[in-house]
Image: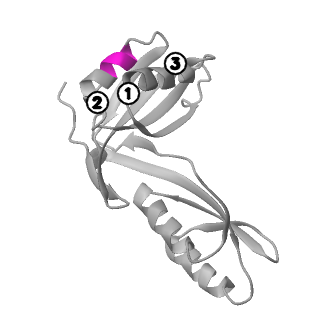
Amino acid sequence: MTPPEPYLGVLDHTPVRHHILSVLVENKAGVLARIAGLFARRGFNIYSLAVAPAESNARFSRVTIVVDAESAPLEQIVGQLDKLVNVVAISDIAPKDALERELLLATIQTDVDNRTSLLDIIAEARAAIVDVDAKSVTVMLAATPKGCDDFEKALEAFAAVELHRTGRVALPRLGKMASA
């Protein structure tokens, strides 16, 4: 198996190299802890991790792991994951062939003076207002990681009460096969 080229991006002016692993696992207690423990023991860096039931089958979960390719060779990471008994399948998705999304939720303080400029930023990013009161607005954005980064940066001009991001989920683009 020839691994795809990692994502060569820039976050906070530091180059990063990422691989996206989609891992199908049995939905059993302790599986995520075993995966996290494996990464910790081996010194592999996890950049992002998201877990949810796979399709409509509650028997399996899909773990999307964005790994730092600088922390260990991809073949070593995949090989170690494959040894875990509850791991059913591993797909390495090349970032250029991936459809990646992340969810961002933020509660922002607003007043009469800044509400219009906040609404402009929300509209430009194609975010959605999910809750509002006299002093704050809660917004949601489902976008690429860069889209979430840009939106988060635009929100820095306002007082954020809370901001949370889910981490990436990814699927291969139609017509592109992920290697298993």
Residue at the extreme right of the image, as rendered? 134
Three-letter amino acid code of the residue under disc 1:
Gly
Q: Secondary structure at mark 2?
A: loop
Where does the image place residue 123, in percent across and percent down from the top left? 56, 76
Q: CA distance from mark 3 to mark 1?
A: 14 Å
Question: Residue at horizontal 75%, vertical 72%?
Answer: 136
Where does the image place residue 75, in percent across and percent down from the top left? 25, 24
* Among the 4 quarters of the image, the one containing residue 42: top left
Where does the image place residue 52, in percent across and percent down from the top left? 58, 33
Label disc, if present, on residue 34 of the rendered structure: 3
Label disc, if present, on residue 27 of the rendered structure: none
Residue at the extreme bottom of the image, as rendered? 113
Q: CA distance from mark 2 to mark 1?
A: 8 Å
Q: CA distance from mark 2 to mark 3?
A: 18 Å
Question: Residue at horizontal 55%, vertical 26%?
Answer: 61
Dot 3 alpha-carbon crowd within 10 angstroms: few under 14, some 14 to 19, many 20 or more: some
In the rendered image, which quarter contains the C terminus? Answer: top left
Label disc, if present, on residue 43 of the rendered structure: 1
Check whether the beta carbons of the residues at disc 2 and disc 1 lie within 8 A of each other.
yes
* Among the 4 quarters of the image, the one containing residue 121: bottom right
State yes or no: residue 81 in magenta.
yes
